Image (tube, rainbow, N blue to C red):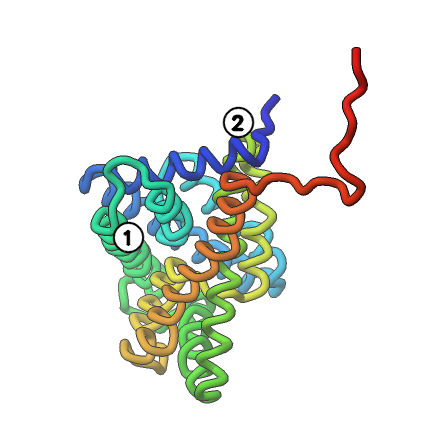
Amino acid sequence: MSYVNPPDLARKMIDAGASKALMSTKDTLIRAYMAGAILALAAAFAVTVTVNTGNPLIGALLFPVGFCMLYLMGFDLLTGVFTLVPLALLDKRRGVTMKSLWRNWGLVFAGNFCGAFTVAIFMAIIVTFGFTTEPNAVGQQIGHIGEGRTLGYAAHGAGGMLTLFIRAVMCNWMVSTGVVAAMMSTSVSGKIMAMWMPILVFFYMGFEHSIVNMFLFPSGLLLGGQFTVMDYLIWNEIPTVIGNLVGGLTFVGAMIYATHYRTSPQTEPVDGPIAVPAE
């Protein structure tokens, strides 16, 4: 059977969290760097498909290919460790402390950003022929995304900030569901199918993913987007990171831990315990 039942899934999640918390600095950085780069490339691919076809649904349908690749190769996204590592701390796994949790999150954030920024530079070179021409249609679209998801939120003040935060929460609700759902299968095809669906939902719905944004917004700045670094940090990246943490940990990690790992005893029927017939 390739299906992993929910109680075993919960244990796998905690085991994975402990493994990531105790991973060496070198391995954590390499895996985070590659995850950020691959996801950024997938975002560039999805934007290119959307521009060339004029149909955002096609871009969203194809975007999960990047997430599936990085997961199958064992690379780590910040959104995933937000969900898994706290479970190992909550379960009091040996060696897992608040210090190791913050260390893991900090290293994965740095690695993801460096990987995404590398692809941002590469794509900026590609769409401008080495910065010798104006950005092509894909480059212009990336610049507009950056403006809409910073200045667009800022124009609505507190309501815009709330909308940004909720979109970030819902994003990692879906993304972490993809991470966890992949653990429910031991086959490659099963993992891909389980990941594809929630990642498609998050991307098409326009939810805010902190690592995708590590590519889109630096790219927008490199390509002449009309917003600033502070706009990006205050009106996107920082609230998105916080929302991603809340969404993944609360709606995925904590829920599965509470009901499938720390299972409460069953209640007795209202008319008393069920009689067991004598043999």
Relative height, residue 70 to residue 174 (above, below): above
At x 38%, y 52%, the residue is 82
How far from the left and from the top, in percent, is residue 72? Answer: 44, 35
- Circle 2: residue type: Thr
To which quarter of the image does residue 244 belong? bottom left
To which quarter of the image does residue 223 belong? bottom left
- Left or right position of 126 against 144: left
Disc 1 and disc 2 in contact, CB within 8 angstroms = no
At x 50%, y 70%, the residue is 166
Q: Residue furthest top?
A: 279
Q: Is residue 118 visible?
A: no
Give the quadrant of the N terminus: top right
Which disc is residue 41 wearing? none
At x 38%, y 66%, the residue is 242
Q: Residues within 10 Å of mark 2 (few under 14, many from 20)?
A: few
- The local secondary structure at tag 2 comes to loop
Identify the residue position indicated by label 1 in the image: 105
Mark 1 and mark 2 lie on one chain; the one further toward the N terminus is 1
Identify the residue position indicated by label 2 in the image: 186
